[in-house]
Amino acid sequence: MESLAFLTVDDQPIAIQQAVKYLQTSGKLGQFIGDILRQYVIEEELRIREDIVISPGVTEQTIIDFRLKNQLTDPQSFQEWLRNNGTDYATFHSTVAFGFKLEKLKAAVTEPKQQEYFIERKIFLDRVVLSRIIVDNRELAEELHAQIEEGASFEQLAREYSLTDDRMVNGMMGPVSRGTMPDILRAAVDVASPGELVGPIQLEERYGLLRIEQFLSASLEDTQLKQALQNELFEKWLAEKIQKLTVKLQVN
């Protein structure tokens, strides 16, 4: 039996077998199948869940808002935009509705686990704004510490003595995740206060003086952070679902 064309390029048919071969050769077959499995899991979950319901009015209003924002209120202009983007109204409508369903599914799947996941990840989410002076021997570090305690400018000494590139900005490191700090540094920082000087601390082969500028404690009240954690949890949930699938590639 002759294979049906998967694509037609310059009037030349490309069968599904040839398409799969192209994907294998380019190393993209795994990603292609992964995208299919991802969508399969999502759509199956949406099919069996009765709590994921989207009002048709919400979808319609979103499309109206989109057309207004993009100056597509004229029906002919909108149809031309749809054609240029390789779609039609029915598909576009389905895509918008699916977006709302996906967000609702994410919330339903992740909300029961979000607080626990946040606590588990909090050490990496909490950040500390630090400035530092890094030198290659303890004696110099102790001398600089003494000078700062006596009123010398931390910024000036950072520019003059620090071995790291941030000496050009007065030693300012910016926000650092608590979870990525060496244990010895995190222990010292956790008991310090903003404005306090910590060190000298040995960091590998060098010695550091660090000034605590600000503590940035993570909170689920941060909408952007909450969204990021939701996405992480949802991707973990998807990966677990996909791992349980029995998948067979059947191409003659």
Image: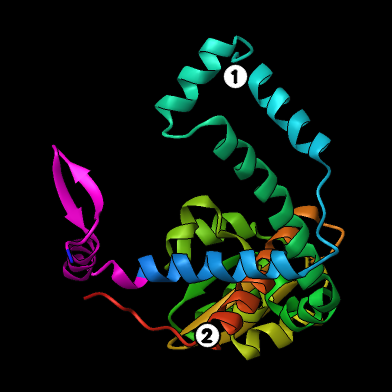
| Rendered position, 102 above or below 163 | above
Question: Which residue is tagged 1?
Answer: 70
Verify CB contact (< 8 Å) between mark 2 and mark 1: no
| Rendered position, 49 above or below 96 | below
The residue at the point 52 percent across, 85 percent down is 245
In this rendered view, identify the residue nearer to me: 83 or 211.
Answer: 83
Label 2's element? loop
Q: Nearer the viewer, mark 2 or mark 1?
A: 2
Question: What colouring style does the render use?
Answer: rainbow
Magenta-highlighted residues: 2-30
In this rendered view, identify the residue nearer to me: 232 or 110.
Answer: 110
Residue 242 in view, yes or no? yes
Counting from the top left corner in percent of width and height, residue 68 is at 68, 17
Amino acid type of the residue that numbered disc 2 sits on in the rendered structure: Leu
Residue 127 in view, yes or no? no
State which quadrant residue 177 falls in. Answer: bottom right
Please identify the residue farthest to the front as the structure is shown.
1
What separation in Å lies between label 2 and label 1 (alpha carbons)? Answer: 41 Å
The residue at the point 72 percent across, 88 percent down is 187
The quadrant of the picture occupied by the N terminus is: bottom left
Counting from the top left corner in percent of width and height, residue 80 is at 46, 18
The residue at the point 75 percent across, 31 percent down is 60
Amino acid type of the residue that numbered disc 1 sits on in the rendered structure: Asn
